[in-house]
Amino acid sequence: MNSLVIIIVALLLYVLLYMTYGKALQNKVARADPNRKTPAHRLYDGVDYVPAHPVVLYGHHFASIAGAGPILGPAMAMAWGWLPGLLWVWFGNAFIGAVHDYLSLMASVRYDGKSIQWISGKIMSKRTGIIFEVYIWFTLLLVLAAFMAVIGNIFSGTPQAATASLLFILSAIVVGLLMYKLKLNFYVTTVIGVILVALSYWIGLKAPLSLTYHNWLPILFVYIIIASSIPVWVLLQPRDYLNAYILWFGLAFGGIALIGLAKGFVVPSYTIFSANVVGKVPSPFWPTVPLVIA
């Protein structure tokens, strides 16, 4: 099938589902009211409750969601053929992923920005909240361990990425201070941030930081502790906002390349139900493909 046809069908499908199913979730389930003040406005304290520009907020959530799974997952899913993964990206996103993320965010907004664990304990029972909290704790432990292992290997194997990433973090902090403390114009701050990101990558190529895998692990551990403890507007939000531009540029150039080439796939639409991908053992399409794509 021609790649241009798939792009057009995807755009039409997403617009249709957004205007129908998405609007139904917004109006009938979440009952969103644009005139209702969010906790960031009602409870503003300059630390945990700080209003964000809509574009910054969008970039923050976009970069948070578009992690390694949604980026690398579709490539891995090619082992089952391009059609199964494509169908999951289309319909799994619309009816499961987007629903989960949207309603989770809306629930948090309704309860003063509290976590889903806290909300479950409030609505259901204290025991439910405790069970959910334990589950989240162990899940995060696994995620952070995987994060440290993967990033440690990347930084030790590609020292240029280490330098670029460290400078990228500093750039995010600068953008956060310019945006929220100095109240610099949003567009000027964005331009400065994008320039700093480009410089970070350029300096990274010129001055690689070479450390071993075991040297990086404690550094990453300290980073995790600090990043999760300080207000989100200091680092995480501006970091993800700047990171979103990298993703947007990648999507734009990738889309242009697909449209320009407009050729069919070199892999079959379907190969086998159980492909040897995960652990080099037969892994069935369900639930493997939804898990690797996320």
Image (tube, grey):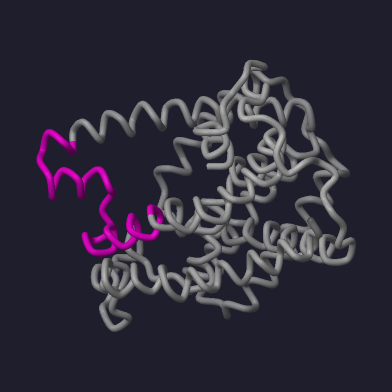
Instruction: Give whichever of 250, 47 is nearer the camera.
Output: 250
Magenta-drawn segment? 100-129
- Residue 25 image position (x, y, % from top left): 34, 67
- 16 over 251 or under it: above or below: below
For residue 37, side relative to residue 77 (left or right):
left
Measuring from the top left, give residue 137's x and y in whole percent.
Answer: 33, 30
Q: Position of residue 218 (x, y in %)?
A: 56, 24
| Residue in the image at 28% along x and 49% along y | 115
Q: Tell me where residue 195 sits by quadrant.
A: bottom right
- Residue shown at 60%/56% (left/top)? 172
294 or 216: nearer the eye?
294
In the rendered image of this protein, does residue 71 appear above or below residue 173?
A: above
Q: Would you say residue 61 sits in the magenta stretch?
A: no
Q: Is residue 161 left or right of residue 14?
A: right
Q: Is residue 108 magenta?
A: yes
Q: Quadrant of residue 159?
A: top right
